[in-house]
Image: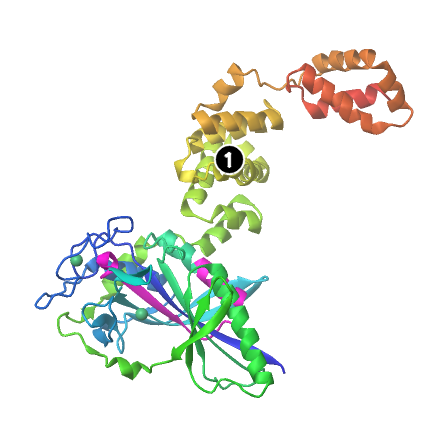
Amino acid sequence: MNLEAIIGLEIHVQLKTKSKMFCSCSNASDDTKPNSVVCPICLGHPGTLPNLNEEVINYAVKLALALNLKINPRSVFERKNYFYPDLAHGYQISQFEYPLSQNGFFIIEEDNKKIRIGIERLHIENDSAKSMHVDGETLIDFNRAGTPLAEIVTCPDFRSPRQAKLFLQKLRQICRYLNISDADMEKGNLRCDVNISLRPRGDIKLYPKTEIKNLNSFKSVEKAIEYEIKRQTELWEKGEKPEIQTTRGYIDAKQITELQREKEESNDYRYFPEPDIPEIFISDEKIDKLQIEIPELPDEKIKRFINEFEIALNDAEILSNTIEISEFFENTVSEFQTLVSQNDYKKEKSKITKLITGWITSELFKLINKENTNIENIKISPHDFSKFIFEVYKNTINSSNAQKVLKIMFDSGADPESIIKENDFTQINDENELEKLAQKIINENAAQTEEYKSGKENLMKYFVGIAMKETGGRANPEIIETILRNKLK
Ligand code: ZN
Ligand code: MN
């Protein structure tokens, strides 16, 4: 049977405003003692009144704009009524009929093909408390109660598990660029439910969908969808396609989904307008003001890097992975420009940016990953890094000593010039000096020289190795090799 998967996502993003959504409790309570960051408002005591935190609107509008959503001039909070022990109010303050924003889209790229994912809506609501199941008992931590959430509902435009994962990864990147959420799935800052149904290819009808919950990593999203496609395909092939909407939970350890319940319709929640909070009005002026605060986003940045610095797409993607990496790169390039003439920079631009890109993405990242740190926390400034690149560019140091210099810079924060001087790393490029050295090596290795001349050419490595050893790694390996080759002809 030729079936295709129809997949949509429902995503909750925790917004990292300083205080909670409706009270002045701190919103950064991840590591604090359970139930220590609470007040009568977020505990839902009778007689208390919520007071909307304006920052929540600002954060959500920025995210909505980045997802190309239309901001509604008027939106309304409604009560979503249901009972659960972690919901002290007996309702969630959410938005239903009049959400903050609607009708957006987001472009993802799979195998060099651009795919447009429609975004139905983005609205704001408060988070519930957190239930923790310990030794057969359920404990509740109200620190999370009242944390602001942006809920994003996509159109069912994904056709593969990988597309869903790519979307979520890009969404996380955008949230971090906007600095509105850490969007860490493992920590629950970014939570995702998947809706999925199958249909015969060519059919335009939508069949009853299955909702998958309890996904807490990009990998589990991908695996759960893969499993569900397999499961539903088998049902279709047996002639038992799903006839009702159901909710299933993902079991990470077994990489399967399990039936939880038949889905409530939204009218089961008995939504009605929240009487304690005024309607929200958002003016065009406010939207313009927030739009200006949005930084250059990854897609634009990648395009600009390719044009401005003549680097490859793949490198541009790596360098714009986070704002901090991109800033380190750009600052290094601009610092480098103060070390050479504008003319030389123009002439040698792609060589220089390639050199900088290469040293950042290979050696510097290696050191950063080994220390499990971030580029914004290292001891090397773009200023010193540009001086280091300049030494490599001028051939003052060869690449093996350059690695040593970088390591010392990384560990101590010292500047490259003094490291090179103190450790005598300066490369020997002087041909006369290397000529003498080559002759000495030939004189002292008569047997190997004969072997080389009779065709064993890989002995060249051996000779160059001696030259490096004799000079403490300072001989220019290319020059000494050329000289040796000429002498041994
Ligand atoms: Zn509170
Ligand atoms: Mn929700």
Q: Judge by depth and name the residue closer to the eye, 280 or 124.
A: 124
Q: Position of residue 202 (x, y in %)?
A: 58, 84
Residue furthest to the right: 454
Residue ID for mark 1:
367
Q: Position of residue 181 (x, y in %)?
A: 33, 55
In the rendered image, the vertical position of residue 238 relative to residue 396, given as above or below: below
In the rendered image, the vertical position of residue 416 relative to residue 234, given as above or below: above
Please tell me how crowded label 1 is: few (under 14), some (14-19), or many (20+) other residues with Cα within 10 Å: some
Horizontal relation, residue 284 to residue 306: left or right: left
Q: Position of residue 310 (x, y in %)?
A: 56, 45
Horizontal relation, residue 367 to residue 176: left or right: right
- Residue occupying the point 50% across, 33% down: 342
Residue 474 is a magenta residue: no
Residue furthest to the front: 135
Among the 4 quarters of the image, the one containing residue 269: bottom left
Q: Quadrant of the N terminus?
A: bottom right
Task: Work out whether residue 246 can be spotted.
Answer: yes
Q: Secondary structure at mark 1?
A: helix
Q: Position of residue 203 (x, y in %)?
A: 55, 86
- Residue occupying the point 79% across, 25% down: 460
Horizontal relation, residue 442 to residue 5: left or right: right
- Residue occupying the point 72% across, 13% down: 432
Region in magenta: 141-170
